[in-house]
Image (cartoon, helix red, strand yellow):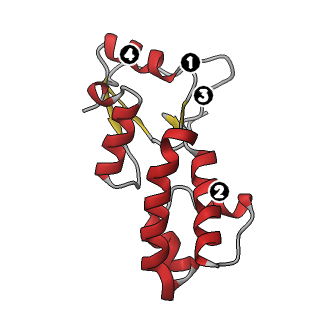
Amino acid sequence: MGDGALSPGTRPSLAGINCVLFDVDGTLIDTIDLIIETFHQTFRELGIPDRPDDEILSWIGKPLFLQVRELHEERSEEIYRLYKELYERNRPLLAREIPGIAEALRALRGRGYRLGVVTSKRSTSTMRELADFGFQGLFE
């Protein structure tokens, strides 16, 4: 097995690992319903044809400004602005903590791991979401 694959029943060694990186959407915070509903509202308010949930889900991970530019280049600024406004309004109602993640993060910190966030979101919205769930002090 010289290709780096593990044989069945073996566990990878964590020796030498001192940092663990996390994404936000779907890893730390369940924002799936929030993202989908916010896009649906944005389309409705702007009179843009709606898209199916599975198509909206396929956009996750790509920066919002690229998503909306590919969606409708002529109206991308308008879509971006309204989406951000609606997202902030909907966030307290639809964003949820991933079950068990707070405990897992605290356990990792307690074992001396450094924690970081890797996301395509802007840092200001990321920091706000981390604060909303009490995570801000856990990450470097």
Q: Nearer the viewer, residue 42 or 105?
A: 42
Q: Amino acid at mark 1?
A: Arg
Going by the numbered disc 4, the residue's amino acid type is Arg
Q: Is residue 123 above or below residue 19?
A: below
Q: Is label 3 in contact with label 1 (beta carbons under 8 Å)?
A: yes
Q: Looking at the picture, tell me which residue is in the foreground, 26 or 18.
A: 26
- Whichever of labels 2 and 1 marks the residue nearer the N terminus, that label is 1
Who's the residue at 30% across and 50% down the image? 123
Q: Residue at x 32, y 35 (%)?
A: 116
Name above or below for residue 126 compared with residue 1.
Answer: below
The residue indicated by pointer 4 is 106
**Taking the image as drawn, is residue 111 in sight?**
no
x, y percent for residue 23: 45, 41
Residue beneath label 3, please?
A: 6
Q: Which residue carries the number 2 mark? A: 57
Graded by Cα atoms within 10 Å as few (under 14), some (14 to 19) or many (20 or more), the crowding at tag 2 reads few
Whichever of callouts 3 and 1 sits on the residue coming sooner in the sequence is 3
Residue at mark 4 to residue at mark 3: CA–CA distance: 29 Å
Q: Residues within 10 Å of mark 1 (few under 14, many from 20)?
A: few
Which quadrant: the C terminus?
top left
**Considering only vertical position in the picture, is 9 above or below 139?**
above
Q: Which residue is mark 1?
A: 11
Q: In the rendering, at what x and y percent does residue 121 appear?
A: 39, 54
Disc 1 from disc 4: Cα separation: 23 Å
Distance CA(mark 3)–CA(mark 2): 32 Å
Query: Tag 2: residue type?
Result: Leu
Camera-nearest label, 3 or 1: 1
Of labels 1 and 4, earlier in sequence is 1
Q: CA distance from mark 3 to mark 1?
A: 8 Å
